Image (cartoon, grey):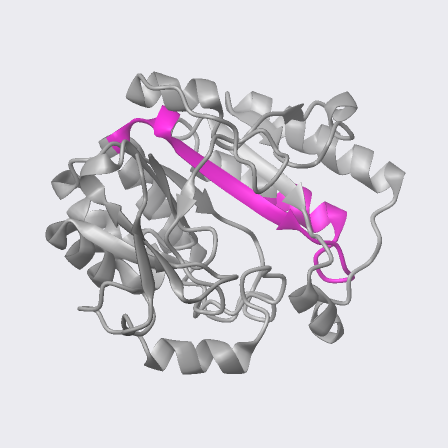
Amino acid sequence: MILNVSGRTDIIAFYTPWLLNRMKEGYVDVRNPFYPKKVSRIYFKDVDLIVFCTKNPLPILPYLKEIKIPFIFQITLTPYRKDIEPNVPDKKKIVDAILKISKIVRKDNVYVRYDPILINNKYTVEYHIEAFQKLCSLLDGSVKHIIISFVDMYKNVEKNMSVLKLKEITNEDLEFLCKSFSKIASMYGIRIQSCYEQDRLIPYGISKEPCVSKEFAYQLTGKKYPKWQARNCGCVSMVDIGEYNTCHHLCKYCYANYDEEKVQKNILKHDVDSSLLIGYLKENDEINVRKK
């Protein structure tokens, strides 16, 4: 079993103590987001690999050497400021953390995500090219992969259009940006790829690859896994232990937060000692052990 920690919220940034507690206890409970009474119980002894997805790996950095299960990192690092990413820490600190993690787990196992890319009058194509150049120079020698994607029109994006003020990217701008990114990345020996962007970026030097492929998972674990059925992106099947509307970053483009009022209420329900990320088990919950 491969755990995604997490695409639904930033567990590492805000809930690392809870995660470490669950590892010590040996299991974690996860509510089904569509059928809340159904709870999956996952035993860490059945976990072959953990994919840590985060904008801020700093909280877990001191504990990495204590984690016995193989893990990789996907760290999102974008050039936006507080207007777009209100609660993301200073990006220099995140870069420093990536450099340290790369030394611990090898650079092959650290993927940086420059996504989503959004264009407006402030964050122009030229702004992104300059920011990407700086990012690659800071990460030189510490990462081999950068994943990019473009902003999608999620519910939260539509709600925040007054802040985002998105401009439609033209074909000419798309070509200029992607070719520039590809050229910069190659200068630093970095492979730049997209996931879930179909084939439209391939002509501009951006390869289309899964974020976590079946081949990569086999290389790390020696086991074969099916493709992820939730999205037709080619990624390996993963089990997410997060919960929607629980991320404190409150990024204006986020797909996992779509009700900021609910986010604040959920945060108050978090207990570091609970088996669930948010709240507690109830008498009528149906608990099923997730099979390996």
Q: Nearer the viewer, residue 54 or 279?
A: 279
The C terminus - image quarter: top left
Expressed as whole percent of the image width and height from the top left, the position of residue 93 reads 35, 54
- Residue at image position (64%, 35%) is 232
Quadrant hosting residue 165: bottom right
Q: Is residue 106 highlighted in magenta? A: yes
Would you say 173 lies left or right of 286 here?
A: right
Quadrant hosting residue 65: top left
- Residue at image position (52%, 61%) is 34
Q: Is residue 189 above or below residue 125?
A: above
Q: Nearer the viewer, residue 90 or 209?
A: 209
Q: Is residue 44 highlighted in magenta? A: no
Circle count:
0
Q: Is residue 160 above or below residue 233?
A: below
- Residue at image position (15%, 49%) is 26
Would you say 29 lies left or right of 230 here?
A: left
Expressed as whole percent of the image width and height from the top left, the position of residue 222 reads 30, 16
Expressed as whole percent of the image width and height from the top left, the position of residue 203 reads 78, 22
Would you say 244 lies left or right of 292 here?
A: right
The N terminus - image quarter: top left
Q: Is residue 261 above or below residue 207?
A: below
Expressed as whole percent of the image width and height from the top left, the position of residue 74 reads 43, 41
Q: Nearer the viewer, residue 189 or 17?
A: 17
Q: Which residues are magenta?
A: 105-131
- Residue at image position (52%, 33%) is 211
